[in-house]
Amino acid sequence: MTDRIEKRIELKAPVSRVWRALTDHREFGEWFRAKLDGPFVPGQISRGHITYPGYEHLKWEAVVQKVEPERLFSFTWHPYAIDSKEDYSKETPTLVEFRLEKTANGTLLLLTESGFDKIPSNRRLEALRMNEPCRTKAVAAGPPNGRLMHPSLPRWATRRGYPWLRGSARGGHDQSLS
């Protein structure tokens, strides 16, 4: 079993546009189905609540690690932490990294989530299973406002509001963004 998920996604948009979609808390929240309380600040907790129907009772919480303009945005969180009776704060969180690289046609988004090997064994496989096959589709689809939406991809969301949808998304994707 691997301790990480890695995806490469080609986006037909400038790095500045992809960066804004990832790091503006309103756009991120729209994209990943969470209403966040405020901007992302390195070293601080990002809080909000999930807006996906059926999961509105769940809270969004992540610790922003790095914000390196138009290059790297990262945070730690507890993936697939959907049981409101469970205290996940004692678990080691995973690290989610969005790395951007300029390409001839737009932007290469390198998406990595690592640290699954530190999740307690009783929920490790499910946390990995719920994140791995779906991560790429939500990023490639973009936020539901249509500005980054690719018309052929469905608007699904996740359990716990994290955008990694069910389904297979192997390899790279070439998506248009405007």
Image (tube, rainbow, N blue to C red):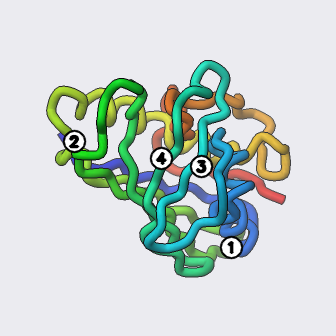
Q: From the top left corner, tell me how far across and down residue 29 is, in percent.
A: 67, 48
Q: From the top left corner, tell me how far across and down residue 93 is, in percent.
A: 30, 51
Q: From the top left corner, tell me how far across and down residue 20 is, in percent.
A: 71, 67
Residue at the bottom extreme, as displayed: 69
Categorize mark 3 by other alpha carbons within 10 Å: few (<14), some (14-19), many (20+).
some
**Residue type at numbered disc 1:** Val
Q: Which mark is residue 171?
A: 4
Categorize mark 1 by other alpha carbons within 10 Å: few (<14), some (14-19), many (20+).
many
Report the residue marked by disc 3.
173
Disc 3 to disc 4, how far (Cα)? 7 Å
Q: From the top left corner, tell me how far across and down residue 153 is, in percent.
A: 70, 33
Report the residue marked by disc 2.
119
Report the residue marked by disc 1.
15
Could you tell me if the residues under marks 4 and 2 are in contact, i.e. CB atoms within 8 Å? no
Is residue 39 shown above or below 58?
Answer: below
Q: Residue at x 59, y 49 (%)?
A: 173
